[in-house]
Amino acid sequence: MPETSPHSAGINDGTDTYSYLGPAGTFTEAALAQVPEAQGRAWRAVNNVGEALADVADGRSVAAMIAIENSVDGGVSATQDALASVPGLRIIGEYLVPVNFVLVARRGTTLDDVRTINAHPVAYAQCHLWLESALPDHGHIPATSNVTAASTLLENAAADAAIAPPGIESRLDLVVLAEDIGDNPNAVTRFVLVARTTSIPAPTGADKTSLVVELPEDRAGALLDMLEQFATRGVNLSLIQSRPIGDALGRYRFVIDADGHVLDERMADALLGLRRFSPKVQFLGSYPRADKQPIEFTSRYDDEIFIEARDWLRGILGGEPEA
Amino acid sequence: MPETSPHSAGINDGTDTYSYLGPAGTFTEAALAQVPEAQGRAWRAVNNVGEALADVADGRSVAAMIAIENSVDGGVSATQDALASVPGLRIIGEYLVPVNFVLVARRGTTLDDVRTINAHPVAYAQCHLWLESALPDHGHIPATSNVTAASTLLENAAADAAIAPPGIESRLDLVVLAEDIGDNPNAVTRFVLVARTTSIPAPTGADKTSLVVELPEDRAGALLDMLEQFATRGVNLSLIQSRPIGDALGRYRFVIDADGHVLDERMADALLGLRRFSPKVQFLGSYPRADKQPIEFTSRYDDEIFIEARDWLRGILGGEPEA
Amino acid sequence: MPETSPHSAGINDGTDTYSYLGPAGTFTEAALAQVPEAQGRAWRAVNNVGEALADVADGRSVAAMIAIENSVDGGVSATQDALASVPGLRIIGEYLVPVNFVLVARRGTTLDDVRTINAHPVAYAQCHLWLESALPDHGHIPATSNVTAASTLLENAAADAAIAPPGIESRLDLVVLAEDIGDNPNAVTRFVLVARTTSIPAPTGADKTSLVVELPEDRAGALLDMLEQFATRGVNLSLIQSRPIGDALGRYRFVIDADGHVLDERMADALLGLRRFSPKVQFLGSYPRADKQPIEFTSRYDDEIFIEARDWLRGILGGEPEA
Amino acid sequence: MPETSPHSAGINDGTDTYSYLGPAGTFTEAALAQVPEAQGRAWRAVNNVGEALADVADGRSVAAMIAIENSVDGGVSATQDALASVPGLRIIGEYLVPVNFVLVARRGTTLDDVRTINAHPVAYAQCHLWLESALPDHGHIPATSNVTAASTLLENAAADAAIAPPGIESRLDLVVLAEDIGDNPNAVTRFVLVARTTSIPAPTGADKTSLVVELPEDRAGALLDMLEQFATRGVNLSLIQSRPIGDALGRYRFVIDADGHVLDERMADALLGLRRFSPKVQFLGSYPRADKQPIEFTSRYDDEIFIEARDWLRGILGGEPEA
């Protein structure tokens, strides 16, 4: 059963609670720690993305922090599919957490003693090279989270060591056998904060819009047509991920992050084009980018250009002679 | 000086006058005869397209009939350039006139006597094959209109025969030496009726929209970008004609006829896209097609699709949760 | 250490061995059972995709069967990434295996007794709905394969039941508590047979070509440009999957299955266009489709059309006058 | 009957003769004067483009100089249509002639005396502004060439003045009443030298390729498809002109000048794509540009890129493992 963390302050009617993949110490908790509004509120550790989104959908939490993409491992399928299937949710913020790992063990264990390792499968995959070289003959026991992998060491002796997030030794009575064991020193995980609110964060000039789009039919060029809706309005994509719809092989929906805000004229127009192209398009939100990098686009797609064109057309329809 | 024809009925303050390329008997007059509203009004015969459009621009005429395209000879450049440069004009109707020719001469002349032929250059070109075969050694004197070519025969003897529209023998004291001498039996000329009004004829489902578009810059793919504005909205083009802007070789504007009416959602959206693409786009009018052929387009571009998309976006922006 | 199965017949120098994700009883073994050439050879059960491909790359096996896509769960990232990074491999065949699951337990256990379930994460996810409804309060212990999930029940009592492939009860001393517990009755997994050979299976008219393409630069429209290489040659895609390159967020390579064979003119030309577009394109093979569905394409992309065009150009370059 | 000019030197069996629109003094003659190979040969003045091309087709001339585009008036339709319909011709060179005009008259005439003007219709149109302002009440008699317009003044008194090329006063006993009367001081006419040879001038890096392409069918997007054949190979167009095929309204062929030489890989590939797209494509020649401006294109379309791609594909088909 999920527990609310000591961050909790005051009554817990859901409007004051944030859900995240627990237990305390996970990268998800580190992402939640970046949210100013979440400070001093109740933090509710849950077991998986589905639970986190259900908390929001059912009103038990005001928002949930969930991992959506990893620079090494790619899109988090479970998150993408959940966002596509739970209605009424909106992404309201994006957060980046550098991802690195340590190998921890019970006091008294040395690296030479390690035969079997507890590790979450994603973490395990990301430490592949180090493990190959340092512990070529180890065995692997999968865990449900990076923190659980470590804490299980204290419960039973099935494994000798665990892959865990840095800092775990301050929470659990374990020793660090090796640091920086991730294969990619630049690895980073992208998290999103999901809420039930339908009010959209104001544009900042450095925004992102997330969508799920199902191709309207299985014909050659449907994907091309979809992408042109963005390209012809100068909207760049930072993520495109195909996900099976699930009813048959070869049928996909696409999870898309597009540069810009729905209140930008070019994005609004792209969404109109997209919606006409496919009735099955889901708006997941417009929100500030974690990297605060302003969106670049050619002046051809400025808001004024759109407004001028509308004024021009209105003039034609309204019977004004052209200048 | 232009003369108003016996069609005239009542005062001639311009609101009651139609201009056309005269003199009486031209194909242009035949086009004007197809306009119900022009019956019983004053018809003003002018010498060229520039004069006809100036009549409209200056209020001397309520409308002018001008040739815009010939199935054999192509777009009438003078008309296209004039429409592109005289502001405030609108095409309000389209008319087709089959084009054929007769060879006429003064009484007493036989085909064997013919050495020199009066002919408007376009008519001359369209009878090329017949002339090559029947009169291989003839000379050519250019004329300013098909009717003038014939009437000049009665003024001087520089030419022995003239190429003229069928029926000319009922107006002028001439004999027909040969009929159906045009190379292409299906030749047809397309005329448009141009007015200063800014009210747009109501959509009929079989409409055409005429535009002049200047490419925004001389870069690879600009023409492609322009055409995509139509293609991505399912709008087909029935005419595209490049015309030099005139300031340098290789700089063009395009005269375009697009299938559909500006009050069709897909056309309005294409015009918005076009205007954003190039500020130099000129709307020449939406009007019923002469051939009354209903416009075909896939249901993907139905008006309702556009309206639904707008409602959907409005819902998002207005804070409604998605269904 | 991997074991070779009783299918083994004769010496095992690698030219006679097929690797697959074991142990016996997995869906991967069911896929391998569909390969006529593999009958009567040694079957080598390995622990993961990386091991299977290493067997092939190092010559320990002549081929390896690996799962590449699941109709519910999507592309198998590990397989896609491994194929993209191990050079010299080719896909030579494709196989489909319907995927369903049973819940098994030690003799004497009833459904009411089940508190904790062993399951491979993918299988667990695919039985989500049934588990929610039949066992809402269960716990989950991850396993490394569907067969291991079941066999572990016989080794320790940490779990009460396991999700396993149908038929497991004939191999292990377990009872079936529930059948057909997968959420999607049409679920199917797609497997490919990977070899080191560079000879390409002959075209059958029902072929598939697999590629990995890295976008050449991070600019708007690069993906669009890539897709146009296929679209302008009438080549349809049955799979497109973005995978992070791994060096930074937002940098992707694409795993692609295209309809047709590299010996089809249109496909060869698309590959040329693709290679010019990006030097980082990897050809993974052309091979018969598992569903034997002939590829449909408009006659505009027939082989003869390509050959005629080449002949025409050769005529021009060779100085022949055009017909 | 055409006359051969005093440039003539030696026997006139056609291999030594150049045809041009005469008489001597025309802009076409000025273009021919730019051709080194034509110096010291026979120059044959003809009456129109058709005659000039027939001279070449029938072997009476080795080449013909013809006007193909005017910066003010656009493509010369007669030339474009003739090139599209006479088989076996090739453009082998391009020449530019600045176009300006003078007003000439018989000795003793002053500007105030001018009532009627002889002028070729194109020249007349290009002096429109000056005539409007200086001689608002004049009449116009059409002439078949700019030189004829002037020489006719000496034959009869139907006109008082003529529009003619600068320098005409050195050939004919006339006086210049006004200079630089063309509306556009930068007006230039583009000429091409047409031969029957099928050997293609060597690439210079500053070349042009001329084509005539008929759209394969009357469907939305056919023109777009055609243009993409160039765009996807980085080939820019310097001319695109629609011409009616002549069989029905709305049916067009396109006259195209593309930047580059058929021996450039990207152009050869574009021609292959074009020929597959439409069997009705006519190659009119690759030849050095008159302006000697080197063609710019991104390195993505370098010859080596094409060659590398072919080598790569050959490696795949030939059974070589990929590097």
Image: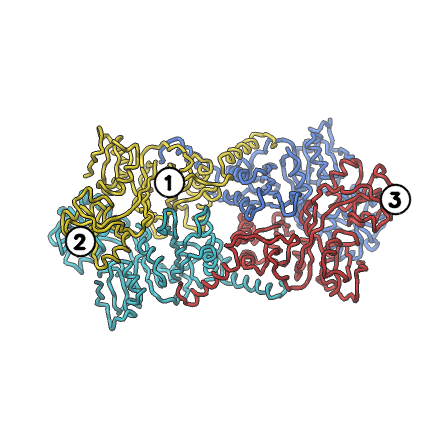
Chain colours: A cyan, B red, C yellow, D blue
Q: Position of residue D315 (x, y in %)?
A: 40, 33
Percent across and percent down for residue A2 are 22, 63
How many residues crowd around disc 2 within 10 Å: few (fewer than 14), some, or many (20 or more)?
some
Circle on res. B107: 3
* Residue A310 versus residue C231 in the image, above or below: below
Task: Tell me the quarter of the image containing the C terminus of chain B.
Answer: bottom left
Residue A285 versus residue B226 in the image, above or below: below
Q: Where in the figure is residue C117, as x and y percent of width and height?
A: 20, 53
Identity of the amino acid at label 3? Answer: Arg
Callout 1 environment at 10 Å: few (<14), some (14 to 19), or many (20+)? few
Q: Where is residue B139? Give x, y as percent.
A: 80, 39
Horizontally, is D84 left or right of D123 in the view? left
- Circle 1 sits on which residue? C291
In what element is the residue under mark 2? loop
- Nearer mark to the viewer, of 2 and 1: 2
Q: Quadrant of residue C9?
A: top left
What amino acid type is highlighted by mark number 2?
A: Thr
Locate residue C152 relative to residue B28 in the image: left or right: left
Of B305 and D244, which appears nearest the observer? Answer: B305
Residue carrying label 2:
C110
Q: Tell which residue pokes out farthest to the right in this image.
A: B108
State which quadrant residue D6 falls in.
Answer: top right
